[in-house]
Amino acid sequence: MSEVYTWEPSNAAIAARYGLDPADILRFDTNTSPQAPPFVAETLGGPFDPPLNEYPDSAYAALTAAAAAYLEAPSEEIIVGAGADELLDLAAKAFLPAGGAALLPVPTYGMYGVLTSQRGARIAALPRRGPEEGFALDREAVIARLPDVQLVWLCDPNNPTGRSEDPATLEAILDAAAGLGAKGPLVVVDEAYHEFAGTSVAGWRGRYERLLVLRTLSKAFGLAGVRVGYGVAARPTIARLERVRPPGSISTVSATLGATALARPELARANVARLAEERARLAAGLVACGWQPYPSTANFLLVRVGDGTVAAAEAAADGLLRAGIVPRTFGPANPLRGHLRLTVRDRASDDRLLATLAALAERPGQAEPAGQGRS
Ligand code: PMP
């Protein structure tokens, strides 16, 4: 039997158990300092609440409740983490044994392969369909491989191809996985870009016990530096993840900001609306430069550069970097070599990108920085 970390109960839990006011609880069990250094209050114009000299609430009750309210799900079906990346890691730790295998429809988000390797498990890579079919999942091929794997990494909308999956495909895969019973794999559906696409399979967790849906505050909520993500699944799956969750990986500051963000979804909605408009404008600008952006339901565009050769993508990336503009490139072994991935930013930043591209087209290899400063 492996050892499982048991966290110290929160102030709220102790107060509830003994009928006390949480404000009257004094911790002599956690070896913390009696106060935070003065610069915290000086920086913030007052002490941070909850106090930063203490550890965060081990249950992350407020953050979990905020995610539950946002999802309209019970708190027991939520797990929070230091970004979606930590939850991906927990999923691999809890469900992927060393010597096992994980199904990876490629191209997709790089962490899935990294985490699979870190577990000492095999990557069962499966090509997605081509650009003419929207880089969609190969439904039959995925289903055929399900009996051989303990975990399936799905991403919807998929990074880096930027398209949403057909819900019927996801349903067919989940049905087939459920049909394998207790031996069936965990199916992770990473919905990091959910807010941009508007679709979700989170509501299916009652039908599929081995479905784990992951979300993040790094994208539509605009808080990548805060490092908060959350997952939603049927209770038995959440319970397995909780057994490998480290205590306190989300700082008190991050948990507080994360809860506030989830309670104000209208801000994320406004961001999504603005970015959808800007995405169309950026795509049109790229087309005018002779590039081919693929349709996107996310906050980035996958772009076929010029004639789609590796040389064209490399030259463009080099020219952009010399002007201080950083595109996402793909290595020589990646099926997307010859492409770049570009985040949709704000109008001023995207204009600087487009102006640099126009300059590159005129004088390849000699682009000067277009515009100055950070925007
Ligand atoms: N999943 C996908 C598909 C992503 O693109 C990213 C960020 N690039 C993440 C997860 C990681 O999200 P977080 O910042 O919450 O760790």
Image (cartoon, helix red, strand yellow):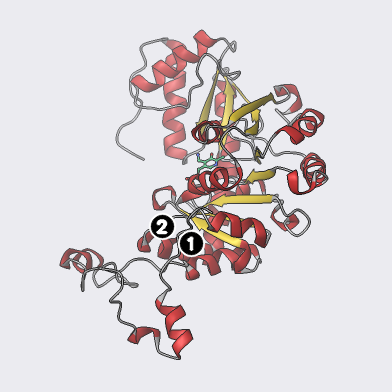
Residue 175 screen position, x and y as percent: 82, 45
Between 368 and 92, the residue placed more toward the observer is 92
- Left/right placement of residue 204 relative to residue 67 reads right
Q: Furthest residue to the front?
A: 1
Mark 2 vs mark 1: give the one in front.
2
The image's mark for residue 250 is 2
- Left/right placement of residue 62 relative to residue 128 reads left
Give the image quarter of residue 292. top right
- Numbered disc 2: secondary structure: loop
Q: Is residue 257 above or below residue 279?
A: below
- Numbered disc 1: secondary structure: helix
Between 352 and 238, the residue placed more toward the observer is 238
The kind of residue tagged 2 is: Ile
The kind of residue tagged 1 is: Ala
**Residue at (40, 55) in percent of width and height:** 249
Residue 333 screen position, x and y as percent: 55, 15
Q: Earlier in the sequence, mark 2 or mark 1?
A: 2
Residue 367 screen position, x and y as percent: 37, 16
The image's mark for residue 261 is 1
Ligand 1 within 8 Å, label 2 CB: no
The image's mark for residue 365 is none
Q: Residues within 10 Å of mark 1 (few under 14, many from 20)?
A: many
